[in-house]
Image (cartoon, helix red, strand yellow):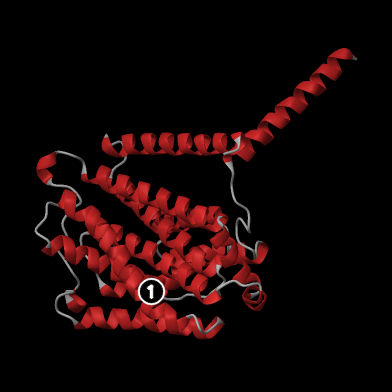
Amino acid sequence: MPKNKKSSYLLTLALVVVLYGVSAFLVASGRINKYVSGILVMVLVNIILTVSLNLASGFLGQLVLGHAGFMSVGAYASALFTLNSGLPISVAFPLSILIAGVVAVIFGILIGIPALRLKGDYLAIITLGFGEIIKVLINFFDFTGGARGLRGIPRVVDKSSGISVEFVKFSYAFFLAVLTIYLITAFIRSRHGRAVIAIREDEIAAEASGINTTYYKLLAFVMAAFFAGVAGALYAHHLGVLNPAKFDFNYSVEILVMVVLGGMGSITGSVVSAIALTILPELLRGFSDYRMLAYSVILILVMLFKPTGLMGGYEFSLSRLVRKLRGKNKEKAEQEKVGAAK
């Protein structure tokens, strides 16, 4: 591994560790109350959803409007497992996260094989229909709680352990968000990711170049579904109750708005927009009569003056920032030497 790349990875890892250490300390010590820690968990859940949808809609270039459907499948699969497994929650919850992802993958394959033969609006309509069908099925079956919702989902840690529930929820959400960002970034930078981007740029040319377009479209679609299922598992055990009305068309559009606002094909943009659009409605709660109006106006202004999204196709690099700062300091030192010589 080149020295520059290795130092970049170490620098990023150090920043992640410091960020987690400070945040976890504030949550565990109670300096951040339950309301704020709950918002932090939802920020991390939305980061997972936005980054994963960006893989399908931003990097692959397919308009997907059923991401909330995959999230709901993962949420209910995870919750039903922890409710009925009989295992201690410390064992059942990590297993339920994996189960949520796997179940979402199964549905992703079932939907993706026929849906990805279509393009544009037709694909959007099929994925939209999938989300609505899932919501209807959840309302129909008794074991999912029906329209009343699924209640009594166990907390992520036993009461007898003495560990803060908020701390455990935040820790799971933080590390899963970091893992999602890392895995999707690594995938995009690999030859498989370059194949996915080639399909977005020109599918016919990509196929003529020997790229198996059907395989890579399905792979990206299924990966996005997996992480949506993982986000659903976190969401279910964070709230402790599931309402099928939450996972409707509007929620899928909300996730897509985060992707578009941050920048299609920018993981950094997805993270920034997920943070902003999760916190902004909470900050505007004091203006309850005008909250949604202000929220909408902000989105419109961003799209008017920055149509490519907040970050466009830009990706933040800590090592690049350090090199720029070093370059500026070096240039400043040289100017000071020239000034002193005169």
Above-or-below relation of 119 to 82:
below
**16 sits left or right of 81 in the view:** right
Q: Residue at 59% of width from left, 47% of height from top? A: 316
Seen from the viewer's position, the closer of residues 134 and 213 is 213
Residue 273 percent coordinates (x, y): 51, 57
Q: Which residue is mark 1?
A: 108
**What amino acid type should be assigned to the residue bearing mark 1?**
Gly
Residue 128 percent coordinates (x, y): 42, 81
Instruction: Say which quadrant the N terminus sits in.
Output: top right
Q: Residue at 43% of width from left, 80% of height from top? A: 113
Residue 272 percent coordinates (x, y): 51, 53
Instruction: Say which quadrant the C terminus sits in.
Output: top right
Say what secondary structure mark 1 lies in.
helix
Residue 12 percent coordinates (x, y): 50, 39
Above-or-below relation of 233 to 145:
above
Q: Residue at 35% of width from left, 69% of height from top? A: 105
- Other residues around mark 1 within 10 Å, as few (<14) / some (14–19) / many (≥20): many
Q: Residue at 11% of width from left, 55% of height from top? A: 87
Q: Quadrant of residue 192?
A: bottom right
**314 sits left or right of 232 in the view:** right
Q: Quadrant of residue 208?
A: bottom right
The furthest residue to the front:
210
- Count of numbered labels shown in the rendering: 1
The furthest residue to the right:
342
**176 sits left or right of 270 in the view:** left
**108 sits left or right of 207 in the view:** left
The furthest residue to the top:
341
Regarding residue 297, the answer to whether it shows in the image is: no
Above-or-below relation of 120 to 20:
below
Regarding residue 211, the answer to whether it shows in the image is: yes
